[in-house]
Amino acid sequence: MDARDLLRSVRMAGSAQGRRTVAAAWRRKRTDARDLPPYGTERARVPGAAVRAEPMPGGGTVHFARSVLRVRVAAGGAVFCGWDGAAPEPSYALAGPSKWGPAPGLADGGCPEADPRALLEPDPDGWRVVSERVTVRVSAHGAVEFRTPGGRLLRRELPPRWWDPAGAAEGTRGARWVQRSETPADARVYGLGGRAAGPRLAAGTYRLWNTDPGGSFEPGDDPLYITMPVQLLVSDAGCHLVFHDNTWDGRVTLRDGEEGAGSGHDRHGGCELRMDGGPLRYWVIAGTPSRVLAGWTALTGRPALPPRWALGHQHARWGFGSEQEVRRVAAGYREHGLPLSALHLDIDHLDGHRVFTVDRANFPDLPGLARDLREQGVRLVSIVDPAVKREPGLGAYDGGRAVDAFVRDVRGREVRGVVWPGEAVFPDFTDPAVRTWWGGLYVERLAQGFAGVWHDMNEPVSFAAFGEPTLPRSARHALEGAGGDHRQAHNVYGLAMAAAGYQGLRELRPEQRPFLFSRSGWAGMQRYGGTWSGDVATGWAGLRASLALVLGLGLCGVPYSGPDVGGFTGSPSPELYLRWFQLGAYLPFFRTHSAIDAGRREPWEFGPEVLEHARAALAERARLLPYLDTLAHVAHRTGAPYVRPLWWNSPGDRALRDCGDAFLLGDSLLVAPVLEPGVTMRAVRLPRGLWYDTATGEAHRGRTRVRIAAPRGRIPVLARAGAVLPVAGEGGAVELEAWAPRRDRSGGGVLFTGDPDGWGRPRMERFVSRWADGAVVVERDGGEEPGYTVRVRGAGS
């Protein structure tokens, strides 16, 4: 503990909760000092020279003097590499079968079949495996190259290095290791989960350890709540995703490449991945961005489809405090003519912050409140934290003890921490029986009338006056029967909790799609729901971080996300609140939220001008709901995010790769939010094609930089020429908004309709737009009448 930690602990000791956090921090420190295996002598190891190779279905195995590498091409084109016997399964990331869809950590999980056409064969410098989308070359000393079918380098993994504990058998899974890679000089890197700076990740070091940053965060803060060893790289050679399937703590250090001028040589970009333990295994998926995300979500699970109401505007505040205040806020939305889809109740509605309870004094009739709001078209959503107060007589605590649900230490004692209710214990969600028990507890939330849940504090967090605010690293976990400690379980704790909640809600309310989003998670979390920014700082930097998070998470396969509009902490200025609100109106998860001491977030609290402009943003959100619902179905089927970087359809356009201040909403719209104060004009770099300013109808040619008006009342939104968007017309009926294609081109769009909240099979309709006899014609794919009112906009060129 350094001097700052000591000072902080002294300050916190002044209150009862503060004294608990000091005691918890010391207890955690002593526990790890006692129970973690001591660091001893280590022996460095590299693969050495190749000895022999064995062809196998989909690839083969190469034996080196001191290591073994398995290469396996899956039927969908993903390539698996595993060192020292590391197999694809068991894995928390891969989508395995269960009664209600994918579940984590199943030994007979979702690893795809091998591609029988891919064979390991000799190569001049070793061996190669040729597949449809990528060629893998393994050198005689353990380097692994991935090249396009045309021979262009995507990445080169250099021979890894392990540090085995002295006396341990070679290939020990607990050994720490490092793997360095080289990438093309022009490559840009995205992903690594939810990062506040980006979406393009600059050179530097990023930690892989899910963390509550405490208080609030801005672009310079790292790590945050969701870290994933998932990188998406874009270069002239092509796009590829690499995923290191290892849940331990680690660090990724990125290095930018440099292209040689004239006859000079390029300096490769690079990555160094250091892991504190666990298997060295990884997947590589190559192709266009859409193919990469389709392959990634086929491997780890397609994104959950939210109910349609979850695409509307949602409002939350930590500190509603009473049923009367909730009713007042709902009435305010009605009185001001503002659409509202859901209200979220934070920890203040619980009895002493205890999970699965209700403060009856301030919320005497929660089911009645939920029923009244539901009649007005507003759902209630409840917070659910994982920590259970250590209090005999409390139902969740007694029930958990009865099934041995809580994390224990090496000596078999319950691990105690401190969270909002006080001293607490933590369910071990890596145990299938505990997930089943926990999922059954959601019957209480449904009985209170809640339509959805949001998981918070599930990194997991245990308050500490110093050190890391989480469980001891030595704490024991089931890990699906394999057993292990918190070093291995920490990063998947939130993912496994999401699985428990999702499966419980499906069991308890099988006729409805669950609505669940989680502050923490890991690779594959999209199959259970979405996420949000967490406690983003109120300020223009926090606004920029909000967009970076949504874009980065989408490229990791998590398409449904959004920020706390207005920022979690502090009181935004009217201008900042409005610009944040306008951005949120075009993001998948659109929710205002704030801390208990950060002021109100209702639009009418910021003056009549903000109210007027917020009303316009909400009206546009409501108009675009059929389009957003269609994007949700597309994401569910293909993994393509709702919010996409500008290079999504033009990865070869270098000028777009560093653009992080605008985005595509689906394929049809380009949104350029205002991210700085006092801005009334926005410069935007346009992708290829023709784009219409949706406010003025002015056409702009792509691959140029244009300036577009961004008055206080709106942010620039452009439509792609030829796009056919499903929108809500008068009375909410679906209409088609067609933007004229270029004279020598055609365009189109798609619409999904069907069961808004349940599991009914949706109907998909495709439409084509084209010029005929000097006018724009829209018809169904196949030449039939569209069956909807069509409104044509734009003049074409």
Image (cartoon, helix red, strand yellow):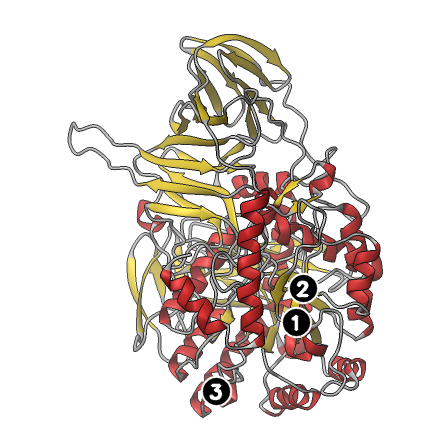
Q: What residue type is labelled 1?
A: Pro
Earlier residue among tags 2 and 3:
2
Residue 670 sits above or below residue 319 on the image: above
Q: Distance between the residues labelled 2 and 3?
A: 46 Å
- Tag in front: 1 or 3: 1
Q: Which residue is drawn at 69% across and 46% down?
A: 411
Q: Which residue is drawn at 36% across and 63% down?
A: 699
Residue 506 visible here: no
Q: Left of 686 or right of it: where is 295?
A: right
Q: Residue at x 36, y 61 (%)?
A: 3
Residue 536's disc number? none
- Hey, which residue is sitting farthest left in the picture? 262
- Element at label 1: loop
Q: Name the residue under label 2.
A: 424
Q: Distance between the residues labelled 2 and 1?
A: 7 Å
Q: Which residue is drawn at 56% across and 42% down?
A: 36
On-image quarter of the C terminus: bottom left
Q: Left of 519 or right of it: where is 66?
A: left
Mark 1 neighbour class, 10 Å CA radius: few under 14, some 14 to 19, many 20 or more: some
Residue 42 sits above or below residue 745 on the image: above
Residue 542 visible here: yes
Q: Left of 259 or right of it: where is 217?
A: right
Q: Mark 3 points at which residue?
A: 612
Q: How far apart are marks 1 and 3 (CA)?
A: 41 Å
Mark 2 neighbour class, 10 Å CA radius: few under 14, some 14 to 19, many 20 or more: many
Quarter of the rendering containing residue 681: bottom left
Q: Where residue 554 sits in the image (x, y, percent)?
A: 52, 52
Q: What residue type is labelled 3?
A: Glu
Q: Mark 1 points at which residue?
A: 421
